[in-house]
Image (cartoon, rainbow, N blue to C red):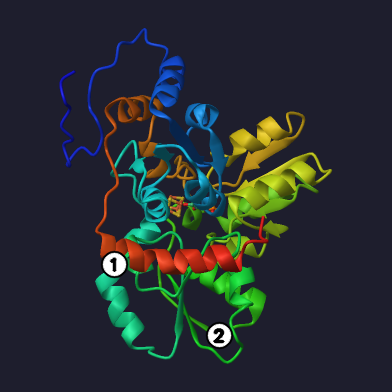
Amino acid sequence: MEIPVLDPAVGYINRPIDRFLNLFDEIERLKTEKKAIILAHYYQEPDIQDIADYIGDSLGLARQAAETDAEIIVFAGVHFMAETAKILSPQKKVLLPDLNAGCSLADACPADEFAAFKAQHPDHIVVSYINCTAGTKALSDIICTSSNAEHIIRQIPEDQGIIFAPDRNLGRWLIKQTGRDMVVWDGVCIVHQMFSEQKLVRMKVRNPGAPVLAHPECEPEVLRHADFVGSTSQIRRFAKEDPRTTFIVATEEGILHQMQKDSPGKTFIGAPPESGCACNQCPHMRLNTIEKLYLCLEHELPEITMDEATRLRAKAPIDRMLAMSAAVK
Ligand code: 13P
Ligand code: SF4
């Protein structure tokens, strides 16, 4: 077979695929042949979620990446997630269907700028949201996800100053929940930032009794209308267990696929974005497609690599997170 070359400007294997090929069967075959596992985030397109071996939030995906005995991890998510998998499982080949699947939060916090910011607060402990690059993780003391952030902040002694990066909305939410005074980096998620408070209020009026389930990356103006705030897995679990039948969901709309599968008789309405666009789909997450996933598994490219010194420095705060939140679901 001709060895494909990855064009860095493109970021994925760009080859024609036989249109009659059953990609689901082919992916299953390749997975078995190559002892590969597909880990997918809830914000992936439904076809990818359906072919995945595990679907979860950032904490669940990190735990899976650390524990799997597969030889290849195909990470159907964004770059910082695949990078986290590589940090935790360096002996495994970690693949990302499209290398350009980034994240506005990770982009908002370049390691060199963050190092200068950190130097201004030398006595502070650094807690970073997992949505950041390996370089920023390497400058952090503890990593957290939206599932365990509050649990982790509450374990830090009251008199210890805290820097929180890079999501200002999650940071503000944590300050409100815990009463801790934190220095917060000014990053936002371009998807969660787009929900419209005004339209959400109208949606609530039209759907009386429907609880609003929101991700903490949303702006405070949206979070103040939420009946439940949590990570994607926590939102999914809440909707499954709650007896009500209609829910308004303020997060990336990919999660609705699993929520609907869990509860076919319930109605899930995506919270409205500011304009009439499809902006409650993450443009980074959605760069991955079933075709790119197939080509990535077939050619074992693009692969995540990083230098060992950065990996080891980035691993320490992730290990601390895993140890501090073993009880968090
Ligand atoms: P969680 O799935 O951990 O809640 O994260 C949401 C998110 O925005 C990931 O990019
Ligand atoms: Fe990043 Fe937001 Fe996309 Fe998640 S949804 S990957 S936080 S841009």
Quarter of the figure with residue 55? top right
Point out the residue furthest to the right here.
243
> On the image, which quarter does residue 87 sit in?
bottom left
Question: Which residue appears at 46% of the width and 35% of the height?
Answer: 38
Q: Position of residue 102 (x, y in %)?
A: 34, 50
Indicate left or right for 257 with 240 as reference: left
Q: Is residue 273 visible?
A: no
- Is 220 situated above or below 100? below
Local crowd size for mark 2, using a 10 Å CA cut-off: few (<14), some (14–19), many (≥20): some
In this rendering, would 226 be left or right of 2? right
Residue picked out by circle 1: 110
> Does the Cβ of the disc 1 residue fall within 8 Å of ligand 2?
no
Spot occupied by residue 246 in the image (x, y as percentages of width and height): 75, 40
Q: Secondary structure at mark 1?
A: loop
Quadrant of the image for the N terminus?
top left
Report x, y in % for residue 59: 55, 54
Q: Residue at x 59, y 75 (%)?
A: 153
Mark 1, Cα crowd under 10 Å, few <14 / some 14-19 / many 20+, is: some
**143 lies left or right of 122:** right
Disc 1 marks a residue whose amino acid type is Pro
Q: Earlier in the sequence, mark 1 or mark 2?
A: 1
Residue 2 seen in render? yes
Question: x, y percentage for residue 248?
Answer: 67, 46
Above or below, comparing residue 258 to residue 25 in the picture: below
| Foreground of the two, 224 or 158 | 158
Q: Which residue is mark 2?
A: 181
**For the residue marked with disc 2, what is the amino acid?**
Asp
Position of the C terminus, as image quadrant, is bottom right
Q: Nearer the viewer, residue 216 or 18?
A: 18
